[in-house]
Image (cartoon, grey):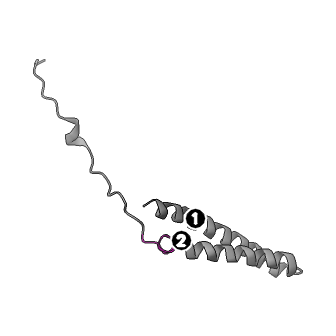
Amino acid sequence: MPTNKHKRKASAHSKTKAIKGFQSSGLISLHPKAFAIGGLFFVALGLYLLAFESQNNAMFGVAMLSLIAGGSTTIYANFALAKKKTD
């Protein structure tokens, strides 16, 4: 074994770092406040349909779909809105 073994620096193997501040170009990421308001509208519409118009199965289904779509859109828009405020 040679006593002077060549060792490489750890910095030579480091990977390039990702660009910080890169924001996805999705529609919800670009306009999170509008999608949050739209999601709350769908939640309100779903609650209205569930409370007053759910005598038949079709309106119950539309109300549940509206609640699920509005809730998920609002939550996703709030995540995008929180990330956008910190930048």
The picture quadrant where one finds residue 50 is bottom right
Seen from the viewer's position, the closer of residues 11 and 44 is: 44
Residue 44's x, y, as percent? Answer: 74, 75
Q: Residue furthest right?
A: 55
Horizontal relation, residue 67 to residue 4: left or right: right
Q: Is 26 situated above or below 15?
A: below
Q: Residue at x 22, y 40 (%)?
A: 11
Magenta span contains residue 12 = no
- Percent position of residue 76, x then y: 58, 65
Numbered badge on residue 24: none
Give the SS element for disc 1: helix
Residue receiving disc 1 = 78
Q: Residue at x 19, y 41 (%)?
A: 12
CB contact under 8 Å: marks 1 and 2:
yes
The magenta-colored residue range is 25-31
Residue 87: horizontal and vertical position, in percent? Answer: 42, 61
